[in-house]
Amino acid sequence: MDLENHLERKDKLQMGNPTAAKYGRYYWCVKSKLSKSGEIYVMADRVEFTPSGGVIFWCDPSENDGDDKARSRTVLQTLALAAGQWMAVFAASCMDGHAVAVEHWKGEIVESAD
């Protein structure tokens, strides 16, 4: 995905779901054929990889709301994918969606023409 398309999608997400950040402090990308673009972006505080090969994204409301009522709530599952429904998970940049801790990933890192 190129930078322009990602930023356009990010703007739509922010306009369409301005509370997405309440579901986690971190922005993740999941490579999956379940999405037309091949990528699913999700906000979550924690990622769990199950023994059967699935992946679960979790939100801890007490980490995100900052109020006493949130502390009494249980953690929330924000997304779960079964084994075989995903190929890779990485912490994504909020700016361009690329992996934040990866310097070189041929075919994934797209340089800006600017």
Image: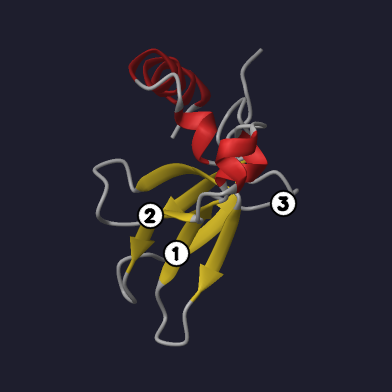
Give residue 56's position: percent from left, percent from top. 44, 64
Quadrant hosting residue 46: bottom right
Give neighbour class at mark 3: few <14, some 14-19, many 20+ (Cα, 10 Å).
few
Name the amino acid, label 1.
Answer: Ile
Residue at disc 2, secondary structure: strand
Mark 1 burial class by Cα count in 10 Å: few <14, some 14-19, many 20+: some
Q: Is residue 49 left or right of residue 33?
A: right
Instruction: Look at the numbered disc 3 and give the secondary structure of its residue.
Output: loop
Q: Residue at x 37, y 64 (%)?
A: 86
Q: Nearer the viewer, residue 86 or 54?
A: 54
The amino acid type found where label 3 is placed reads Val
Picture coordinates of residue 9, whole percent (x, y): 39, 23
Q: Earlier in the sequence, mark 2 or mark 1?
A: 1
Which quadrant holds the N terminus?
A: top left
Marks 3, 1: nearer the viewer: 1
Mark 3 or mark 1, which has the lower sequence index? Answer: 1
Left or right position of 91 against 108: right
The residue to which callout 1 is attached is: 56
As displayed, is residue 60 above or below residue 1? below
Cα gap from disc 2 to disc 3, whole angstroms? 23 Å
- What mark, if any, has residue 102 been given in the picture? 3
Tell me which corner region of the image, top left, top right, bottom left or bottom right, holds residue 21: top right
Q: Secondary structure at mark 1?
A: strand
For the C terminus, which image quadrant?
A: top right
Instruction: Return the mark for residue 79.
Output: 2
Mark 2 or mark 3, earlier in chain: 2
User: Pointers 2 and 1 in contact (CB under 8 A)?
Assistant: yes
